[in-house]
Amino acid sequence: MKLNVDYKIVNVKNEDMEMEDTFNIKVKILTYKENIALLENHNIDYSKLNSENEEIKFMDYAKDVFINSVVEWENIEDSNGKDLECNDKNKSAIFDFNPAFAQKVIEIASNKINDSKKK
């Protein structure tokens, strides 16, 4: 058996999200260990997830997942049409401005990995 220890990188494109603007986001699927480390950093109490404090912790965790997963992008621009550099500051701003978009990117990337395992 050959063990594949390479990171899985998937492309999330505008078509995947049913959007007209053309873009491509390369997403690294976090390993189990990386994901657990992020979870531990936020100390989320799932029994109190309906409380505002725990919801904030969970959103901070989701933001960290986005920041740590997105490795590159093309055709992501600011409101003036200028290309945005793919860095943690800009990833954070994208999440803060539109967390639903950021979470959808991660969801689609995860689904692409799961779909490829079924084949």
Image (cartoon, rainbow, N blue to C red):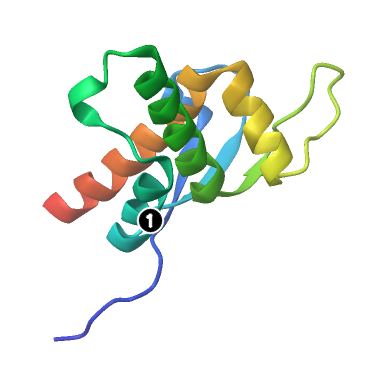
Amino acid at the residue labelled 1: Ala
Residue identifier under label 1:
37
At a point 58% along the width and 39% down the height, the residue shown is 24
Locate the N terminus by quadrant.
bottom left
Instruction: Name above or below for residue 44 compared with residue 11.
Output: above
Instruction: State the SS at label 1.
Output: helix
Quarter of image, res 9: bottom left
**Residue reaching furthest bottom?**
1
Q: Residue 116 or 46: which is nearer the viewer?
A: 46
Rendering coords of residue 66 (x, y %): 50, 39
Rendering coords of residue 74 (x, y %): 67, 41
At a point 57% along the width and 26% down the height, the residue shown is 95
> Counting other residues with Cα less than 10 Å from the Cα at mark 1, is it few (<14), some (14-19), or many (20 or more)?
few
Q: Residue 109 or 53: which is nearer the viewer?
A: 53
Quarter of image, res 61: top left
At a point 36% along the width and 34% down the height, the residue shown is 108
Q: Residue 6 or 30: which is nearer the viewer?
A: 30
Rendering coords of residue 44 (x, y %): 32, 35
How many dots with numbers?
Answer: 1
Horizontal relation, residue 11 to residue 33: left or right: right
Q: Is residue 56 visible?
A: yes
Rendering coords of residue 21 (x, y %): 62, 20
Instruction: Name above or below for residue 38 compared with residue 25.
Output: below
Q: Is residue 16 visible?
A: no
At a point 52% along the width and 50% down the height, the residue shown is 68
Horizontal relation, residue 43 to residue 20: left or right: left
Horizontal relation, residue 98 to residue 89: left or right: left
Horizontal relation, residue 17 to residue 84: left or right: left
